């Protein structure tokens, strides 16, 4: 079960890579057996798990909000899962970031009439206005692009709750949003949080930085309590304790890599010390211990982001 979950995740993430991008027919085939499973987290809130990033659903008399939409061939199954919850068709769609395993269904939902919302950089990257790393799709059609974009965040006032998207600068990418349901006490963290299935993926080529991931997690921990249901980008729904464990892992590895750099060690020498070994427990995981250490090492070479993040924060307050 665990291995299957990880393999599914690996495939999902690999599909964002142009090298691994299969032909359309194969792609449709690959998704044929995927089942979308729904788990209710609170009144009017559910998580949908299929292949790709976890989907959040917020529904009620004022309409349905979808958080992320996995891959295009899964749209009919996602729509069916939304309907099975007793929810209306999707009215608003928020992308937590631009990666294909979270925004692949945008064109379908956009054409079906959903309004797509995301951080400014999500639109820039999906439309090819900004150079990106793996999986950038500069030819994304108009209907796939967010029509309502924001910098610091936005709030939707629906279904008796306040659904807030808050930008976390330079974390998994440079366009990440974390979604908070204020009353229901639920959060969707996108790929800032990989819960148990793999070590974190830091998309440096899309402006991501491990220091921004840590900053985001540090910001969120005081905002949640023991009852908060935390939807990670990938992996099972988590608790505050899981998020604290994730923060501790980040700090331990970052501190070890920092120390190694201070001691004049090369990346290979730091990797040989295996600072992430304790969490590098699944050989099928998408990101290995060595890959994560490399991402941390490279993140520490680009300190400009931390200044950037600070100025964003100051402005937000
Ligand atoms: Zn993802
Ligand atoms: Zn991602």
Image (cartoon, rainbow, N blue to C red):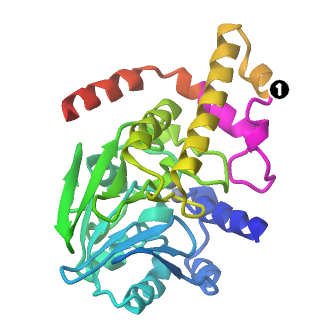
Q: Quadrant for residue 284, please give it.
A: bottom right
Asked if 41 appears above or below 10 in the picture, the reply is below
x 69%, y 39%: residue: 291
x 28%, y 62%: residue: 183
Q: Going by the picture, which residue comes out furthest to the top?
A: 263
148 in the magenta segment: no
Q: Position of residue 236 (x, y in %)?
A: 59, 64
Q: Which residue is mark 1?
A: 272
x 81%, y 25%: residue: 273
x 36%, y 46%: residue: 175
Say whether residue 261 is left or right of residue 127: right
Q: Position of residue 173 (x, y in %)?
A: 44, 43
Q: Going by the picture, which residue comes out furthest to the front?
A: 226
Element carrying mark 1? helix
Q: Which residues are magenta?
A: 272-297
Q: Quadrant of the N terminus?
A: bottom right
Q: Position of residue 14 (x, y in %)?
A: 62, 59
Say whether residue 296 is left or right of residue 43: right
Asked if 41 appears above or below 145 in the picture, the reply is below
């Amino acid at each position: 079960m665990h291995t299957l979950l990880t393999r599914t995740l690996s495939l999902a993430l690999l599909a964002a890579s142009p090298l691994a991008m299969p032909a359309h027919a194969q792609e449709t085939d690959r998704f044929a057996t995927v089942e979308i499973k729904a788990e209710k987290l609170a009144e009017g809130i559910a998580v949908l798990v299929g292949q790709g990033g976890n989907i959040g659903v917020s529904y009620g008399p004022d309409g349905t909000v979808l958080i992320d939409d996995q891959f295009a061939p899964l749209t009919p199954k996602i729509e069916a899962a939304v309907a099975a919850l007793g929810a209306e068709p999707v009215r608003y769609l928020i992308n937590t970031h631009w990666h294909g395993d979270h925004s692949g269904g945008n064109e379908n939902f956009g054409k079906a009439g959903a309004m797509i919302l995301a951080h400014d950089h999500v639109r820039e990257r999906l439309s090819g206005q900004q150079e990106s790393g793996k999986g950038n799709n500069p030819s994304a059609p108009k209907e796939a692009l967010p029509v309502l974009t924001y910098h610091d965040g936005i709030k939707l006032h629906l279904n008796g709750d306040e659904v807030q998207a808050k930008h976390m600068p330079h974390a998994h990418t440079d366009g990440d949003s974390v979604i908070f349901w204020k009353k229901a006490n639920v959060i969707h963290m996108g790929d800032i949080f990989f819960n148990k299935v793999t070590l974190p993926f830091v998309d440096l080529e899309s402006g991501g930085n491990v220091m921004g991931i840590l900053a985001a997690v540090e910001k969120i921990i005081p905002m949640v309590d023991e009852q908060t249901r935390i939807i990670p980008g990938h992996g099972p729904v988590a608790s505050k304790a899981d998020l604290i464990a994730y923060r501790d892992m980040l700090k331990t590895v970052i501190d070890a890599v920092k120390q190694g750099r201070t001691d004049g060690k090369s990346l290979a020498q730091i990797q040989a010390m295996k600072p992430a070994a304790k969490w590098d427990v699944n050989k099928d995981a998408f990101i290995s211990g060595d890959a994560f250490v490399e991402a941390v090492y490279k993140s520490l070479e680009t300190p400009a982001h931390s200044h950037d993040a600070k100025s964003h924060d100051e402005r937000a307050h």
